[in-house]
């Protein structure tokens, strides 16, 4: 058998095999690129911790805000009690009520003095929650970038 006949015989077998292997490789590469990669375990762990921290902070902030509102209501109640004593007589607080008036007045002043510290604490809580939420959002954005 001449060499050209042998070559034709082998090329009829090898050429389709090479084409199939090339097409299969191309399809596998396309499929690999379109499938989202699994995010690294460290990023997933950080994301879970950041989510838990943000959720926990939001819950604590809600409790802190409720306490602040309740404190505000108590301060308002004390202010109304002081005004009530002062409204008893246009000339001033009656002598028989003066001891209770002073106690109410002192309580109100002490509570009013604590107001800025409580407001600052609430602002600090809010800032910490904002930071935790921003960290979580940044991690989510990173994860989305990896998944593309």
Image: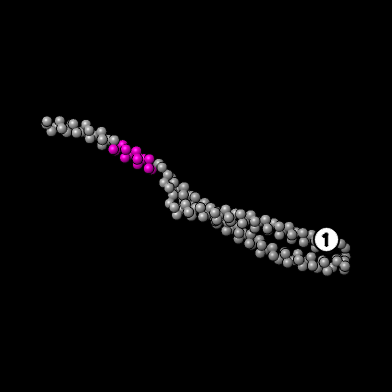
- Please state which of residues 21 and 138 is positioned toward the viewer in this rendering: 21
The quarter holding residue 85 reads bottom right
Percent coordinates x, y for residue 68 in the rendering: 68, 58
Judging from the image, what secondary structure is the residue with disc 1 in? helix
- Please state which of residues 87 and 97 is positioned toward the viewer in this rendering: 97
Percent coordinates x, y for residue 48 in the rendering: 51, 53
For the C terminus, the image quarter is top left
In the image, 119: left or right of 18?
Answer: right
In the image, 57: left or right of 108?
Answer: left
Residue holding disc 1: 84
Assess disc 1: are there few (<14), some (14-19) or many (≥20) residues with their C-alpha within 10 Å of its C-alpha: few
For the N terminus, the image quarter is top left
Q: Residue at x 79, y 59 (%)?
A: 80
Residue 129 visible somewhere in the drawing: yes
Q: Residue at x 60, y 54 (%)?
A: 58
Look at the image and give the residue range highlighted in magenta.
Answer: 21-33
Magenta stretch encompasses residue 95: no
């Amino acid at each position: 058998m001449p060499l050209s006949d042998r070559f034709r015989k082998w090329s009829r077998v090898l050429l389709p095999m090479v084409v199939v292997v090339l097409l299969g490789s191309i399809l596998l590469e396309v499929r690999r690129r379109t499938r989202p990669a699994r995010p690294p375990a460290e990023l997933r762990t950080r994301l879970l911790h950041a989510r838990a921290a943000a959720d926990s902070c939001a819950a604590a902030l809600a409790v802190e805000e409720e306490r602040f509102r309740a404190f505000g209501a108590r301060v308002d109640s004390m202010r109304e009690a002081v005004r009530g004593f002062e409204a008893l007589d246009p000339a001033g607080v009656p002598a028989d009520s003066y001891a209770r008036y002073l106690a109410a007045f002192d309580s109100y002043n002490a509570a009013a003095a604590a107001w800025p510290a409580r407001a600052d604490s609430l602002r600090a809580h809010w800032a910490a929650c904002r930071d935790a939420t921003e960290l979580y959002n940044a991690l989510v954005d990173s994860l989305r970038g990896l998944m593309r």
